Amino acid sequence: METALNRGIGDINATLASITNQVAALNTQTLTTDFLDNTYFIISAAINGGAMGTAISEVKHPGVFQIASSASANSGARAITHSNSIRLSGGEKTTIIFKTPANLTGVTAVMGFCDTLDAIAWADCACIKINGTTLTGETESNNAGSTTGTSYTVAVDTWYRVVIEVNADATSVSFKLYADDSDTLLWSNTLTTNIPTAAGRELHYVITAIMASPTGTTVLLLIDYLNIQFTNSRRVV
């Protein structure tokens, strides 16, 4: 039989759980942009004459920016945080809503925690890579890399949502790909090797895409939404 004492204890436990959740939320640093204006928290730069700019929004996709090539080989653009601004320590998570272009031939895109500047070379990462129509998860530490054991074949001209999450003690990185505006999980995998956590393995956040042999200005990637969370970086309360 429930007593007043038991109810009181239950209420106290519920209150303590609520306070714990509120403190955890306050100690989670979150960066989010829907690209509705130019106040992005990332820095953009062209690669071999490519460009980054706003694109026409679509239904359920307010605020879209695009990466495009020039006519030069391996051209495109990148959006990054400051160099060496992130050292993975566990609890990092990012969600990206993106759309593939009408033609993926020769396109390479990288999204996530990675020190690349050109989508070609990097030393440290925990990121998603799209090479043509093949999407994989990647980790790399000091040039020693791992790739997910499975991949996913993305379709052209299609919206997706990808989630990359580093576990609490930074011993694994999970990768999940969802259908647009849906909880339908299309693909997932996890890596537990070559996660860059040591001193000297600092990196930045990046979204970048290039095209190997464009014949002119070509859209390479559309981004609608970006969220980055740090749940284990510092206490603020």
Image (spheres, helix red, strand yellow):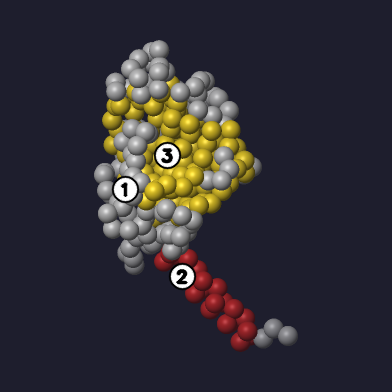
Q: Circle 2 sits on which residue? A: 19
Task: State yes or no: discs 1 and 2 in contact (Cβ < 8 Å).
Answer: no
Q: In 3D space, how far apart are the residues under numbered discs 1 and 3 (Cα atoms)?
A: 13 Å
Q: Position of residue 122 (x, y in %)?
A: 34, 41
At label 1, the amino acid type is Leu
At label 2, the amino acid type is Ile
Q: In 3D space, how far apart are the residues under numbered discs 2 and 3 (Cα atoms)?
A: 34 Å
Q: Circle 3 sits on which residue? A: 111
**Is 15 or 95 nearer to us in this picture?**
95
Q: Position of residue 169 (x, y in %)?
A: 43, 63
Return the disc, 2 or 3, that comes first in the chain's sequence: 2
Q: Secondary structure at mark 3?
A: strand
**Is 146 or 227 nearer to us in this picture?**
146
- Which mark, by number, is residue 148? none
Please give the name of the residue rendered at 27% of the width and 54% of the height, measured from the top-left corner.
200
Left/right of residue 95 with respect to residue 184 in the rendered view: left
Please give the name of the residue rendered at 35% of the width and 20% of the height, measured from the top-left corner.
73
Whether 119 is drawn above or below 174: the answer is above
Q: In 3D space, how far apart are the residues under numbered discs 1 and 2 (Cα atoms)?
A: 33 Å
Return the disc, 1 or 3, that comes first in the chain's sequence: 3
Task: State yes or no: discs 1 and 3 in contact (Cβ < 8 Å).
Answer: no
Q: Circle 1 sits on which residue? A: 203
